[in-house]
Amino acid sequence: MAQFFHHNAFGYCLRCPRTRHLHLCFGNLALVATTAEFQEFRRFIEEEHERNYSAYRDPEARCIALRTPTERMALVLSWQELEQLHEILENTALLLEVEALLG
C-alpha cells in the first residue's frame, strides 16, 4: 500500500511501496522522483516561493512562470497554487527527515 506524506486541495505526495519513488500529483502535473530528485525539485520550488513572496496582489492570477528544462515551456501558477505546492513539498520533506532520523 502506498505511503501518503501530505495532501491538500491541490494535490498530494506519496511513496510507491514497490519502487520507493515519490509521486507528486498537483493539479494536472505529475512527478515521479527518487528522493534525491524530489529534494532537488523542492529546493527549486522553495527558491521560487521566496522570490515571488508578496509580489502578487491577486493570489488567483496565474502569473508565476516556472521554467522547465524544455525550451519555451513553463509551468504557470498562481500565488495560491505555488503556496499549496510549496506546502506539499515542505511537509513531505519534513516527514522524510523524521523517517530518516527514526531510521
Image (tube, rainbow, N blue to C red):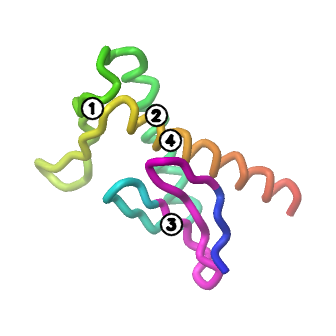
Front: mark 1 or 2: 2
**Disc 4 to disc 1, C-alpha distance:** 17 Å
- Quickly name the residue at label 3: 23
Q: Which residue is mark 1?
A: 64
Residue 53 in percent (x, y) is at 42, 20
| Gap in angstroms between the C-alphas marked 3 and 2 | 19 Å
Q: CA distance from mark 4 to mark 2?
A: 14 Å
Instruction: Give the structural element (helix, strand or loop) at label 4.
Output: helix
Which quarter of the figure has residue 35? bottom right
Alpha-carbon neighbours of circle 1 within 10 Å: few (<14), some, or many (≥20)?
Answer: some
Q: Quadrant of the C terminus?
A: bottom right
Left or right, 78 with reference to 33 = left
**Label number found at residue 87:** none
Query: Can you identify the residue that label 2 sits on?
Result: 83
Counting other residues with Cα less than 10 Å from the Cα at mark 4, is it few (<14), some (14-19), or many (20 or more)?
Answer: some
The kind of residue on which mark 3 rests is His
State which tag comes first along the sequence, 4 or 2: 4
Please name which of the two marks, 4 or 2, marks the residue nearer to the observer: 2
- 4 or 1: tag closer to the N-terminus: 4
In this view of the protein, which residue sits in the foreground, 101 or 75?
Answer: 75
Span highlighted in magenta in the image: 6-24
- Residue at the (27%, 32%) spot, across then down: 64
- Label 1 element class: strand
Tell me how far mark 1 sits from mark 3, CA to CA: 23 Å
In this rendering, is residue 67 above or below 95? above
